[in-house]
Image: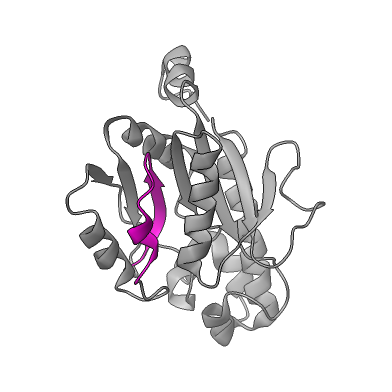
Amino acid sequence: MLQSNNEERDEKTIDFTLASSKNLLLIFTRNPELGKGKRRLAAKVGDQVALDIYNFLLDHTVKITSKLYAEKIVYYSDEIWEQDIWDNTVYDKKLQQGEDLGIRMLNAFQDGFSRGYEKIIIIGSDMYDLDQADLEDAFRALSQNDFVVGPAEDGGYYLLGMKKLKPELFTNKDWGTSTVLTDTLTDLKDEKKVLLETRNDVDYYEDIKDIDAFGPFLKNI
């Protein structure tokens, strides 16, 4: 939402800032299927509730990205679904390629830069603690910086953006562990970068048990 009753903003300026360069948002997602994905959450809440929560998070991701001033590509984990919540008129659709998360992300960034995009940001699809304004701020941050990182509370990151490709960001990382952010920032120590606010992604029951929006899913837990 570019304007609100509580905050008057120059919409023409916002349009120019966000649309004048070629911005690309990469959204990495798992195909939502019972018994797959969110395994650490499912260990506590069960497979069906974990799937329901993941679908809720996917809906949220659509809500915060569909009106963003950027080209958008959804990268599926297993297969491309032509008819799903990702509107084909809003999102391009591709399949993740590579033997681990790092290589899959690297391939997606390489493809984006090869197609002429100037600012590229990647996010996952399990961030309830994220909104459209956060994504807009991240793209703006790339106007004065080469890299932007959104630290996650678990020691990883929920967002990574860049104006130039740095392949070492995607290698020699123990993906899914608490060392990813530290190792990534080490790779970026000599680069012009900005860190966003630390946010919480959804992996465990403890991540959501005190958030009202998840209450309906957890009432029988």
| In-front residue for pair 173/142 | 173
Residue 22 shown in magenta? no
Which colour scheme appears in the figure?
one colour
User: Furthest residue to the left?
Assistant: 190
Residue 128 seen in the figure: no
Rendered residue at 34%/35% (across/down)? 142
Find residue 143 and report its horizontal and vertical position in percent: 33, 30
- The boundaries of the magenta stretch are 156-172
Instruction: Say which of 123 and 52 sits in front.
Output: 123
Report if residue 217 is visible in the image: yes
What residue appears at the point 52 percent right and 40 percent down from the top-left corner?
114
Which residue is depicted at the point 35% across and 51% down? 166
Residue 13: x percent and y percent? 42, 15
Q: How many marks?
A: 0
| Residue lying furthest bottom | 43
> In the image, 35: left or right of 157?
right
Q: Residue furthest front?
A: 114
Residue 145 or residue 36, whichever sits in front? 145
Q: Is 153 situated left or right of 11 in this image?
A: left
The quadrant where residue 78 appears: bottom right
Q: Is residue 211 above or below residue 8?
A: below
* Residue 171 sits above or below residue 19 on the image: below
Is residue 157 covered in magenta? yes
- The x, y position of residue 57, in whole percent, is 59, 59
Expressed as whole percent of the image width and height from the top left, the position of residue 83 reads 82, 52
Is 94 positioned to the left or the right of 115 in the image?
right
Quadrant holding the C terminus: bottom right
